[in-house]
């Protein structure tokens, strides 16, 4: 694959990831949020594959496979099961002021761009220009976590943040060493299981996954 | 034949062409919608028949109508004609093309909007006022979004001149522009809103809960109404061709190059057929949304346009 | 080899305790595994003291005098806490607050948590260190929510989300670090090895490293409990079982700070300025002040001591931020004595709350009459943590303050004021708890207070006299870290 074409393709995929991040930010339904998260994984896999093909980095094929299995198949599957079992499939988050959130999101993108600038100038990868987008995705996922009052969307925001970090690693350095990536994947997977247990505990105790019940511990 | 004369002839040809084919595009869109909804439809020529019928009727005007009310249809029509005439539809360097600045285009559309909104309020009926207010609500969100789309395109070609943008995009090596992809989605959303299409407005109903454009022109009849309807169809054509110029400028000719004209005509025809069918499809699959959701819809369009621009800065593409 | 034992013991212990379930002997097995880990740590420590720094398994592990001291401390506190938790958890079970399955989870996770702590300390790979820190959060999050009360669930959720977000920043910092390293060392897993990074630290790109350090500090700093990222800490300490509070304060905070200090060494080398140190001093000072002023408003005893942990971690961060041999020495000493004292206090507090059935300080009275050991344990621990001579905390705080007076005089009054406020608020609250009137029944199982007094004796010893090998060891570590 020619470098310029794959570079353009990666840019396009990066733009798509940013779009998905914004879509997640404005998505009120839990179910659609999970699907968007799965799509984010798909785009991430494709972009990792494109980088792998154009740079001949062997370990990137593995991390692409890892992304596919973990973030497109396993995690969305667990989340789907969870919302079915917890009966929150049609949960809607009503308390989001979408226009304001979007405006803040745009500010964050600008901030991410400025943050990435000094690093971008030093990087030698063909993907370096996407680093700003990767940081933006991390920040947008963070914003998503802040604006949600329900447990599952918050977790999806957390996972999306991890996706953004993964993308940042790919764009700045062609991915972290494989052993580290495996460790991170393991952490994410174990974390998801623990959260699954945790959701049931929360619902058992509060009869809902609404985090507004969980704002009692405060220092007055 | 001198190059200048040839250019003027070209310009004349294009200007007449857009006025002539505008109702055809509208007819095609309606026909496609009918097909998609399993109806047989009225045929692609139905808008012409409607226009002829309206021109043959006697105009009725309210007693308290001011001169503004009478001249508005003409102003509207000429604004739209001017806009559609200067957009590079068939060729890039037309004699009028210096006027085809994107900011000026937005201005022309705004001028037309101001007049129709004033005329709608002129008689003093409640529907007219309601329509005018809703139109302004949509417009004040759609216009900045449209400008953002234009700016994204301008950033790539370093010019706000539509012909230059077209030149830059059509005649250089093919490149993927993620920013333009965002701008394109935003532009389609703006096109739907500005041309009173579903999901923002429904041009075929007269329900007071939902109508925007129709509410403003309820008091018009006969030739005035015909001109307004015609102007609306030209507006749709103008928006569509602006879209072509920005996102799929391929196949466009250079002024005076009569040999390239057939090819440009065919390209335009194909693009219009495809765009019309696509528009009909979009309108069929989406549901009309509540009027107060419109700001959210246009806000999203604005966001996408801004994102496109940011992505241009981020990725340099 | 010792490393294999050191890491294998808790890992195997965690799996073993999870599979066999909670039998009658599980608390003892837990203590045995912790003891074995401690022995391995002790053997490793003697070897490092004799032979100097070592790397093992293709340089994947690296032990020098800095981390081996933390390894020893971690293994020791983990061992004593396991001794404490044996009767403590039995009493909890007796009170009906815990079921068999919860205890099984607790014992298994306790060992796995020790494993992640030791892995984070011994690994040479900055990426693996991150993985271990994140795993530490995961293992403790279910421990914090062990009681399944609304408050404990809320605390655990806060803990998970805040530390998760924080640790994500640290991952980004690690990515940036790798980015800078890759340009010097080339791609591959070895570029994240701390020893390799340390060797080329002067060649690392300064702008990238400064950015990386900011992210690493914010990320790991969240786990240290530095203000303003400390919100999870009081909740997690107050709502979890007391042994968990003790290991969180005694181990996790130290290990997180260890990660920050390792990053600081690299950042200092690359930048050649005091940027990293200044940042740490700022965060440290802020934590000390914020914690001191929150201390006076606490009603829950565990929450109060959690804020005291924030205060002390802030002080240590400040000391490491100042840099230099003396301040670093003081920081290391303070880390040690704080770990020992704070876990001792939590042991005493744990039994105190079990006797009275409440964590609210206004309802805890007259401990000294009800159980003299608990009362004296709490009183002495409180005096020690407040920096009363002759305890070790006094020595380390004195060193930190005098160094600050010397190099950053403006900071000393702030520190003194904060320490004074902390002293007043803690002492005023603990005094009636210990000496008030009471008519409460005794505990069903005898409390395990040996660990409390062992810890306090060690702290006292460190205040009076630091054994020469220990001093030499601290000095080595200080020389390694100080510029």
Image (spheres, rainbow, N blue to C red):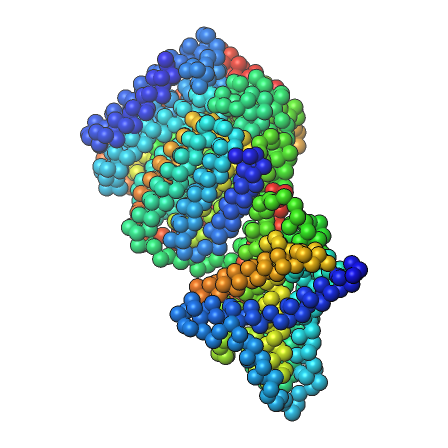
Closer to the camera in the image, C320 or A208: A208
Q: Image check: C160 left or right of A7?
A: left
For the C terminus of chain B, the image quarter is top right
User: Picture quarter containing residue B61?
Assistant: bottom right
Residue A195 position, x and y percent, is 35, 42
Residue B16 position, x and y percent, is 67, 70
Residue extending furthest toward the left: C24
Residue extending furthest toward the top: C50
Instruction: Count the marks.
Output: 0
A93 up-or-down from B178: above or below:
below
B226 up-or-down from A41: above or below:
below
- What residue sits 33% from the left and 40% below the top? A193
- What residue sits 59% from the left and 88% below the top? B57
- What residue sits 57% from the left and 34% below the top? A3
Residue C472 can be seen, yes or no: yes
Closer to the camera in the image, C445 or C141: C141
B129 up-or-down from B166: above or below:
below
Residue C114 position, x and y percent, is 36, 27
Residue extending furthest toward the bottom: B63
Closer to the camera in the image, C154 or C60: C60
- What residue sits 67% from the left and 62% below the top? B87
Residue B177 position, x and y percent, is 59, 47
For the N terminus of chain B, the image quarter is bottom right
Residue C437 can be seen, yes or no: no
């Amino acid at each position: 694959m020619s470098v310029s074409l794959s570079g353009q393709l990666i840019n396009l995929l990066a733009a798509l990831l940013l779009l998905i991040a914004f879509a997640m930010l404005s998505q009120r339904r839990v179910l659609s949020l999970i699907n968007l998260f799965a799509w984010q994984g798909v785009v991430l896999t494709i972009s990792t594959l494109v980088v792998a093909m154009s740079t001949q980095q062997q370990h990137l094929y593995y991390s692409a496979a890892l992304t596919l299995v973990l973030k497109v198949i396993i995690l969305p599957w667990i989340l789907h099961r969870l919302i079915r079992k917890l009966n929150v499939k049609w949960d809607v988050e009503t308390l989001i002021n979408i226009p304001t959130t979007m405006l803040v999101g745009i500010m964050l993108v600008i901030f991410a761009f400025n943050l990435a600038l000094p690093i971008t100038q030093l990087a030698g990868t063909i993907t370096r220009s996407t680093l700003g987008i990767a940081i933006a995705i991390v920040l947008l996922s963070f914003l998503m976590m802040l604006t949600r009052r329900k447990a599952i969307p918050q977790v999806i925001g957390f996972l999306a943040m991890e996706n953004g970090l993964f993308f940042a690693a790919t764009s700045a350095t062609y991915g972290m060493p494989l052993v580290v990536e495996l460790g991170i994947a393991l952490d994410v997977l174990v974390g998801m299981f623990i959260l699954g247990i945790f959701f049931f505990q929360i619902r058992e105790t509060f009869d809902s996954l609404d985090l507004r019940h969980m704002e009692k511990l405060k220092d007055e | 034949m001198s190059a200048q004369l040839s250019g003027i002839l070209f310009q004349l040809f294009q200007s007449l062409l857009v006025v002539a084919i505008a109702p055809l595009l509208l007819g095609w869109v309606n026909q496609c919608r009918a097909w998609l909804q399993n109806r047989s439809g009225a045929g692609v020529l139905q808008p012409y028949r409607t226009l002829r019928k309206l021109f043959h009727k006697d105009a009725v005007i309210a007693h308290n109508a001011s001169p503004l009310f009478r001249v508005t249809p003409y102003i509207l029509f000429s604004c739209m004609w001017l806009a559609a005439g200067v957009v590079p539809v068939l060729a890039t360097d037309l004699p009028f093309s210096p006027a085809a600045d994107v900011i000026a285009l937005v201005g022309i559309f705004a001028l037309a909007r101001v007049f129709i909104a004033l005329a709608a309020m002129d008689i003093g009926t409640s529907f007219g006022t309601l329509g005018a207010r809703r139109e302004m609500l949509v417009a004040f969100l759609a216009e900045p979004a449209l400008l953002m789309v234009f700016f994204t395109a301008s950033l790539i070609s370093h010019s706000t001149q539509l012909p230059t943008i077209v030149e830059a995009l059509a005649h250089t090596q093919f490149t993927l522009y993620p920013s333009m992809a965002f701008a394109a989605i935003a532009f389609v959303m703006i096109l739907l809103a500005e041309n009173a299409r579903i999901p923002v407005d429904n041009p075929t109903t007269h329900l007071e809960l939902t109508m925007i454009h129709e509410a403003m022109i309820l008091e018009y009849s006969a030739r005035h109404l015909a001109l307004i309807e015609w102007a609306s169809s030209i507006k749709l054509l103008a928006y569509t061709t602006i879209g072509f110029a920005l996102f799929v400028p391929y196949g466009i000719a250079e002024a005076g190059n009569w040999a390239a004209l057939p090819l440009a005509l065919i390209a335009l025809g194909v693009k219009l057929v495809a765009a019309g069918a696509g528009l009909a499809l979009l309108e069929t699959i989406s549901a009309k949304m509540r009027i107060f959701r419109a700001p959210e819809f246009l806000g999203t369009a604005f966001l996408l346009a801004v994102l496109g621009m940011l992505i241009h800065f981020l990725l340099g593409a | 080899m010792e490393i294999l034992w050191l890491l294998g013991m808790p890992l195997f212990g965690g799996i073993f305790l999870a599979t066999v379930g909670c039998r009658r002997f599980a608390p003892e097995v837990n203590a045995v595994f912790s003891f074995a880990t401690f022995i391995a740590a002790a053997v490793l420590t003697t070897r490092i003291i004799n032979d100097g720094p070592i790397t093992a398994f293709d340089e994947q592990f690296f032990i020098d005098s800095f981390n081996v001291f933390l390894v020893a401390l971690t293994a020791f506190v983990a061992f004593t806490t396991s001794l404490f938790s044996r009767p403590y958890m039995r009493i909890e079970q007796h009170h009906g607050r815990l079921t068999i399955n919860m205890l099984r989870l607790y014992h298994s996770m306790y060992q796995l948590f020790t494993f992640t702590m030791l892995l984070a300390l011994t690994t040479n790979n900055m990426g693996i260190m991150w993985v271990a820190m994140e795993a530490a959060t995961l293992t403790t999050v279910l421990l914090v929510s062990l009681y399944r009360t609304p408050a404990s669930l809320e605390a655990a959720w806060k803990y998970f989300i805040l530390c998760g977000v924080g640790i994500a920043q640290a991952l980004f910092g690690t990515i940036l670090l790798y980015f800078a390293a890759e340009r010097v060392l080339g791609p591959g897993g070895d570029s994240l090895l701390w020893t390799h990074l340390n060797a080329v630290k002067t060649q690392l790109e300064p702008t990238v490293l400064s950015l990386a350090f900011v992210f690493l500090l914010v990320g790991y700093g969240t786990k240290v409990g530095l203000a303003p990222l400390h919100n999870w800490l009081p909740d997690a300490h107050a709502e979890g079982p007391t042994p968990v509070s003790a290991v969180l304060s005694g181990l996790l905070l130290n290990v997180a700070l260890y990660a920050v200090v390792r990053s600081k060494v690299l950042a200092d080398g690359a930048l050649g300025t005091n940027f990293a140190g200044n940042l740490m001093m700022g965060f440290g000072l802020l934590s000390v002040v914020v914690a001191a002023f929150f201390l006076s408003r606490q009603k829950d005893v565990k929450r109060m001591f959690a804020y005291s942990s924030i205060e002390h971690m802030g002080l240590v961060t400040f000391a490491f931020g100042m840099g230099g041999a003396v301040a670093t020495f003081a920081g290391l000493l303070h880390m040690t004595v704080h770990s020992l004292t704070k876990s001792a206090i939590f042991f005493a507090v744990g039994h105190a709350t079990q006797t009275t059935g409440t964590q609210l300080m206004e309802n805890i009275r007259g401990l000294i009459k009800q159980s003299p050991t608990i009362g004296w344990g709490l009183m002495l621990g409180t005096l020690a943590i407040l920096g009363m001579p002759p305890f070790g905390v006094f020595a380390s705080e004195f060193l930190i303050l005098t160094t600050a007076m010397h190099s950053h005089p403006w900071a000393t009054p702030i520190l003194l004021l904060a320490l004074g406020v902390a002293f007043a608020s803690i002492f005023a609250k603990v005094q009636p708890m210990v000496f008030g009137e009471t008519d409460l029944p005794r505990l069903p199982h005898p409390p395990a207070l040996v660990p409390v007094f062992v810890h306090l004796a060690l702290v006292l010893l460190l205040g009076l006299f630091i054994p020469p090998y220990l001093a030499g060891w601290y000095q080595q570590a200080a020389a390694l870290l100080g510029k």
